[in-house]
Image (tube, rainbow, N blue to C red):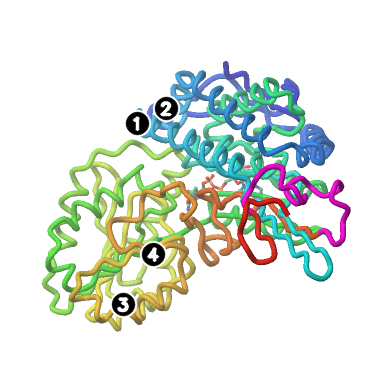
Amino acid sequence: MITGQNLVGGLWESITTEACFQTMNPKTKEYLTPLFQEASTEQIEQATLRASGVSEIYAATSFEKRAHFLKIIQEEIKQNSVEILAAYQEESALPEGRAKGELQRTLDQIERFIEVLEDGSFSQATLHTNGPDLRKILVPIGPVVVFGASNFPLAFSTAGGDTISALAAGCPVIVKGHPYHAGTSELMAQAIHSALKKTGLPLELFSHLGGESHQIGSQLVRHPLIKGVGFTGSFTGGKALYDLAQKRSEPIPVFAEMGSINPIFILENKLKTDENLAADLSVSITLGTGQFCTNPGIIVICDSSNESSLVEEIKNKMATMELPPMVHSNIEARYKKQITHLSSSNSGVQVHLFNENDSALGVVSGADFIESPLLSEEVFGPFSLVVQCHSIDEMVNVAQVLKGQLTATILSTTEDQHNLKILLTKVQAKVGRILFEGVPTGVAVNQAMQHGGPFPATTDSRFTSVGSDAIYRWLRPIAFQDCPDFLLPVTLQNKNPLGILRNVNGILTTNAL
Ligand code: NAP
C-alpha cells in the first residue's frame, strides 16, 4: 500500500508537520492520493549517516549473498506487480503495454546483475607474483545517491539500473524519488526494504526520500559521507548537481545522463530506395510520446536533387498517430514552449505542428542548421528536425557542429558506403553508440551495450548507465602489495576459493595459484 512516507535508513517515517506534495494523473489532470512528505533535513542526515554506518559491512558481503538479495528484490516486485502497475499507469498515464514492458525490463536488468555477481569476474582480480607480490581488485566506493528519472518510473528509478548496479557493486543507496511518480517509487522501495529484511542484510543500507524541492538533492550531493551520484534527467539538473559535487571539499563522481538529440544520417541512395523510412522514423519519433533519451531529435538527409518526399511522408504518418499524454503537465508545458520558440525563431526552421496529437516535425537546410546552435538543443517530446543536405560533405559539416550524443545512426546502402569513412570518423568522435540499421529508440541490456557519450550527453563518457558494465561506476581499484594470504579479500587469495576468472601473471585462469 502507498503510504506517502519516507524510508530513512531502514525506518518508514511520517512527519505530519512537514511540507507535502501530490502526484497527478497526466491524462485527467486530477491530483492523486495519498499526500507524500518532503524529506526533512534531519531525515536526509539520518539516511546518510545510517548508510555510511553499514557501508563497510555491506562491502564485505559475499557476491553470493548480494545475488540472493537481488533475487529476493525480483520476487518482491513480481509479488506486488499488480499494485505497482496500477500506480505506474495512474501516475504516468503510459499505456498498459509500456507499463508491463518496463516492469519486465526492470526485472531483466536485475537478472543481469545477478549473473554478474554469480560470475564474479567483474571484480577484475589481477595478480602479479613476479617481483613484489601485487594483487589488484575493484571494491565499492561507498554510499551513493540515485535520482529517479521522470520518463522511466521503473527502469531508471527506485529499483532501476542505477540502484541495482550500485547494490550489486556493494554500495548502500539513497534514492531521491522523482516527485512525478512518488507512489510507484515508494512501492519499489517497499520491495527493496522487504528483500533486505528477508535476507538479514542491514536495513540501513537503503533509503528512499521524496520531495519536490531541489534542496533535498542538493543536500544529499553535498553530504560528506556520500561518495557518488547517479542521475538521469535534464541538462540543467545534471550539470547543477555535477557542479555541486565538484565544489565539495572532497569532490565525488557524478554519473549524469542528460540531453541528447541522437542524429540519424540517411545517405543518398538509402533515401531513394528504402520505402520503409517514413514509417520507421515516425514511429521512433513518437514512441513513448517522444520521452526517450534515445529519441531521434534530428534526421540529416542527403538529397542532392531536392526530390525526396520523405518529409511529406513522415508528416502524413505523424498527423494521424494517437499518442498518450506526456508523463507530466510540466514536461508537456516545457515541450510546447520549446516548439513555440523554434517556430518563431529566425533560424530558418519551418515547424509543422500536428494539433491532433501535439507532435511536430521541423525542416531546415544544412546551411541554416550549421549556423544556429539553438537547433542542436534537445526538444524533449514527439518532435524531430529534418536537416536537408545536398552532399555528404555538408552532412560531415553538420556532424562537426554537433555536441556529444548518446547515439548516432547512419543509414546507407552498399553503394553509399564507399563515401562513408569521413562521416563515420566525425560521428565516432561525438557519440557512445553508432547504429547502422533501424532506429535509436530501444536499448538492449547486456554487456556490450554502451549507453553514455561525450559531454553534454553525460558527465563521464567512459561509463555506461545501461547494461552490466554499469556496475563499474560504483567501483574503484585497490592493490595489495606483499599482503599475507589470509588477510586478502577471498577473490585474491592463492586458492581462488570462489573459482572466478582472474588474471594471474598475464594469463586469464580460474586455477588456484
Ligand atoms: P530534472 O529537472 O533534471 O529533474 C530530475 C531530478 O533531479 C529531480 O529529482 C530533481 O529534483 C533533481 N534536480 C534537478 N535539478 C536539481 C538541482 N538544481 N538541485 C537538486 N536537484 C535537482 O528532470 P525531469 O524533472 O525529469 O524533467 C525535466 C526535463 O528534463 C524534461 O522536460 C526534459 O527536457 C528533460 N529530461 C530529459 C531526459 C533525457 O533522457 N534526455 C530524461 C528526463 C528528463 P526535484 O524533484 O527537486 O525537482
Residue tagged 1 = 95
The amino acid beneath tag 2 is: Gln
Closer to the N terminus: mark 3 or mark 4?
Answer: 3
Between label 4 and label 1, give the one nearer the viewer: 4
- Mark 2 surroundings: few (<14), some (14-19) or many (≥20) residues within 10 A: many
Per the rendered image, the range of residues in magenta is 480-501
Q: Name the residue under label 3.
A: 395
Q: In this view of the protein, which residue sits in the foreground, 352 or 278? A: 278
Q: Distance between the residues labelled 3 and 2?
A: 41 Å
Tag 2 residue: 89
Q: Position of residue 484 (x, y in %)?
A: 88, 53
- What is the distance, in whole Å, between disc 1 and disc 2 at their CAs? 7 Å
Task: Check contact, mark 4 vs mark 1: CB within 8 A.
Answer: no
Q: Earlier in the sequence, mark 1 or mark 2?
A: 2
Query: Element at badge 4?
Result: strand
Any magenta on residue 495?
A: yes
